Image (cartoon, coloured by chain):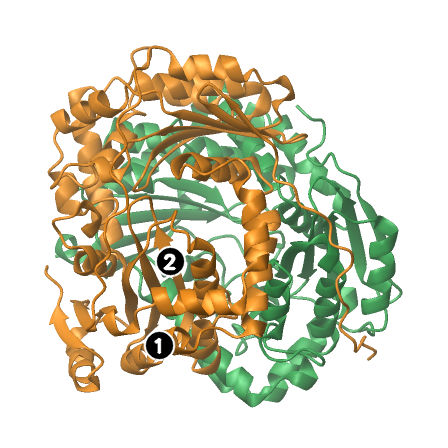
Amino acid sequence: MSLVVERPGPGAARPYRFPEVVRRDGVVAAHLPGQALAMAILLIDAGAGREPSGREGLAAVMSKALEEGTGARDSAAYALALESLGAELFTTVDWDSFRIGVQAPVDRLPEAVALLAEAARTPRLDPADVARVRDDEATALRMEWADPGPRAEAALRADLFGLEQRHGRSLHGDPDSVAAVTVDDVIGYHRTWFGQRGTLVVAGDLSTVDLDALGAAVFAGAGEPVERAGGPLPIDPRSERRVVLVDRPGSVQSTLRLGHVAPHRAHPDYVPMTLAATVLGGAFTSRLNHLIREVRGYTYGIRGEFGQSRRFGRLLVSSSVQTAVTVPALVDTVGEISRTAAEGVTEPELAVARSWRAGQLSVELQTPGAIAGALATLVVHDLPDDYHANLRAALLAADEATVSRAAADHLNPHGLTLVVEGDAAVIRDELVASGIGEVVDAQP
Amino acid sequence: MSPTGYPWPIETTRLDNGLRVVVSEDRTAPVVAVNIWYDVGSRHEPEGQTGFAHLFEHLMFEGSAHVAKTEHMRLIQGAGGSLNATTNPDRTNYFETVPAEHLELALWLEADRMGGLVPALTQETLDNQREVVKNERRQRYDNVPYGDAWLRLLPMLYPPGHPYHHATIGSMDDLNAADLPTFAAFHTTYYAPNNAVLSVVGDVVVADVFALAEKYFGGLPARADIPPAPDGRRPAPPGGPVREDVVGDVPAPRVYIAQRTHPFGSVEYDAVTLLATILGNGRGSRLYQRLADGARLAQPDYVSAYGVDLAHAPAPLIVSATARDGVPAADLEAGLVEVLDGLADISQEELDRAKALLATAWWRQVSTVAGRADALSRYTTQFGDPARAGDRLPAWQAVTLDAVAEVAAELSPSRRVTLTYLTEETAQ
C-alpha cells in the first residue's frame, strides 16, 4: 500500500460571481448561459401569515385548487397542456409569500409562463372542485400527521408563540383547520390577494427570452400592490425550561423538537447567528451531531438552526432518538446549547463554519432553481442586488468574538421548550425525575 | 432537442491498478464534483452478512490511515463543500462537490479511505456506527407508516438466494453477529481501485486531474480476485401471483402492485420507464386521471408508478395508491388493477407527454456537476463507457407506442406482487 501521507493544501481560489441581477418592471431575473432548463416563479404577498384564524392551511388548499382548471380549460386539459411542454408547475406557501412557479425547457418557457398566469389569475375555482380539493388536503394532512414530527412541531409552535398568533400554529395548518376551510374562504382568499401584481422571478439562459413579454403575461389585468404586513414582532425571552410531552404510544423512537424565540431574518446579527448555529448544529461536524450521533450513537442525525421569516424567528433543534435514551439525549443536547451560549465558539470550529457557509454559496447556487430561490430571497426580504456577493464576504470576515457574542445574545438554554413526541408511558417518569424542566402534556 | 443527453466533453483514462478515471470539464462555475462508484452493493452480500455494504457507507466517514474519525466531514465542509454517500443493491457511491481549488483535498481523502480504511477501523467505531445504522432503520423503516413496504416487496419479488432478495439496510442481527476482522475483510475485498470508477466534473483541466489521480490513487494495489455477485439475470419465473396483507397502524389503506420487468439499460427497460411515467408521473398521468380525479378512489398526492433503476437483474416496476377517506382497500385495489389491465390503448399524446417530462427530468439531473458526475460513474461502472450517459435521453425519445404496448402486455396478473396495508378498523 502506498498512500500520500501529507494532506494537500488548497490551490488558488477562483472567484465566485453571483449572476448580475436584472430588474425590469416587476421582473427580477438572472442570466445563466447554457442552461437547458429555465425557472420562473410568481411571488405573491399571500403567505400563511395572511390566513385568517381557524383557517390555517387555506393558502395551501387554494394552491391545489389553482390546478383544477381555468377559465380557458378543465383540469385534465390544463395538466396535459403543461406537461406536454415538459413543464412542471409547483406551488409553495411559506410565512411571507405564496409562490407559483414553472420549470421548463428554456424554449418552452413563454408557453409555460402563460399557463402559470392562467392558473394564478383566472382559476376556475368551481365549488365542487374546491370542496374536493379541501377534503383531499385534509386527508393528506391527516396522513402526514400520522408520521412522527408534525404533532411535535405544532406543540413547539404553540408553546413558543401561542395559539392566538398565526405563527403559533403549523405553517400548513392541521387536519381540523383545513377541514374547516369553506369554498367561500378559498374564493375570497383568491379575490383578496391574487389581484396584486406580485413579482416574477426568472432564472435561466435569457439570450432568447423576452422578459417583458413574460412580465406582460403574468401582470395583465393585475391591480395595485397590497399593503405589507407589519414589522418584526417583539421577542419576549423566557427564563424557565419546560418539557412538552406528545404521546405516541408504542413509538420506538422519541422525536425531539427543541427551541425558543429568536430574531427575524433581516436582523443585523443574521451572519454571526448563522455561524453560531452552524457550529452548534448546522454542519455534520457540529457539536450536537458529534456528541449525540458520533460519540453516543443515540441518533441517525441531529440538526440545530435558526428559522427566520420577515416578522419572527426561532431556534430549532430537531432529532429522533431511540426511546431508551430520550433523557440522556435531552441532557446532552441542552448541555451543548448551554456550553455554546456560555463559552462561545472556538476559532477552529468557526473556521469550518465560515468557509462551509461561504463555499456553499458557490456549490449550491448552480441551477436555475437555486438561483431563482436566491432571487426570491432578495424580493421577500427587501435585500439589495449585491446581497449574495456581500454575504460571502461577511461570512468570511466574521470573527470569533462577534460570533461568540451572537451565541450568548441569541441562544437561551434556560428558556428552551423541549418537545418530546414518544411513548409517554415509557419515558414520562424519567423525564420528570431528570428535572430538566417542568413536564406538561401537549394540548390535543 | 439535443441529439445527446450529455453535450459536455468526456475524457477517460485507466491507471495501471485498474482505476478508471473520467473527467468532464465545465468552467461555468468555480466548483468541482468528485464521485466514486464502487461496484459493490447489497447484491454481493452472502447470507449472514446482509447490511455490510451499507454499513461501510458509514464507516468510510469514520477515519482512515491519515484521516482522523469525522475529520473527512470537517475537511470537506471546512472547504465549503457538500458531501454524502448512498448504497443500493447494485453499488456504493461516495461524492462531494467543493470549490474548485479544493479538488486535490477531495482526491486525497477518497484515496486515503480507499486504500487505508482497514488500519483505522476500531471496535469503538464499529460499535458506534452499528448503533447509528440501527437508528437509521428505526427512523426510516420502523417508525413510519408504510415505511417497511420496500423491505416486504423485495423478498416477494425475488426468490431466496437472488442478489436482490434482501434489502440494502440488511439485518441488524447480521450486523451484530459479525466481528471486526469480518468487516475488515469486506473492505479489503471490494474497495480496490480496479473495482471503482472515479468521475470528476467541473472547473478543472483534464490533464491535471489525470496527474492528480495517479499521484493519490496510483500507489494502491489492484486486487486480482474480486468475487462477483451471484448472477441474478435470469431468476426463476414467478410461480403465480404473490400477495401480502398487512394490518397495521396506518392512516389509510394503501396498495402496492409490483413486478419484475427488465434490467436498467435495456431497450425494454426504457419502454418501462416511459410506461411508468405515463402511469404515474404528473396530474396528466393515468393513475391521477382515473383513480384520483376520475373514480375518486385514491388520494391525489399518493398515486405513483416508477421503475427502480437496477441493472443486474430484471428491475421492479412499482405502482401504488392510497385510499381516499371511506374507500375500502378492495375497491382501490380493483381500480388499480383495472388501470393496469387496460393499457392496450395508450395514445401518442400520452407517450409524448411522458417524453417531455422525462426530458425535463434528465436535464434537471445534469444541471449540476454532481448530477453529471454520478451519471458518468454509473455508465462507466455498469456499461463500461461514460459516453453512454448521453444515450439515455435519445433512447427514451426513440421509444415507440409499440414498444410501450409490448412491456405493458407483460404486466400480466400472474406475475404480480401485491402488498396491501389495511388500517386496524378496516381489517375487522
* Residue at 23% over, 53% down: A145
Question: The disc labelled 1 sits on which kind of residue?
Answer: Ser
Considering only vertical position in the picture, is B279 above or below B186?
Answer: above
Q: Which chain is orange?
A: A
Q: x, y percentage for residue A136?
A: 22, 37
For the C terminus of chain A, the quadrant is bottom left
**Chain B tint as drawn:** green
> Which residue is the site of mark 2?
A306
Considering only vertical position in the picture, is A18 above or below B23?
Answer: above
Asked if labels 2 and 1 touch by Cβ distance under 8 angstroms, the answer is no
Q: Nearer the viewer, residue A82 or A410?
A: A410
Residue B337 is left or right of residue A200, and the answer is left
* Residue at 12% over, 40% down: A53
Q: Nearer the viewer, residue A164 or B216?
A: A164
Which chain's residue wears label 1? A
Considering only vertical position in the picture, is B79 above or below B4?
Answer: below
Question: The disc labelled 2 sits on which kind of residue?
Answer: Phe
Indicate the quadrant where residue B97 lies.
bottom right
- The circle on residue A338 is 1
Query: In what element is the residue under mark 1?
Result: helix
Query: In what element is the residue under mark 2?
Result: strand
- Regarding residue A340, the answer to whether it shows in the image is yes
Which chain's residue wears label 2? A
Considering only vertical position in the picture, is A190 above or below B203?
Answer: above
* Mark 2 surroundings: few (<14), some (14-19) or many (≥20) residues within 10 A: many
Residue B428 is left or right of residue A136, and the answer is left
Could you give the CA–CA distance between mark 1 and mark 2, rounded to whole angstroms?
Answer: 16 Å
Query: Mark 1 vs mark 2: which is more N-terminal?
Result: 2
- Regarding residue B227, the answer to whether it shows in the image is no
Indicate the quadrant where residue A424 lies.
bottom left
For the N terminus of chain A, the quadrant is bottom right
Q: x, y percentage for residue B171?
A: 45, 74
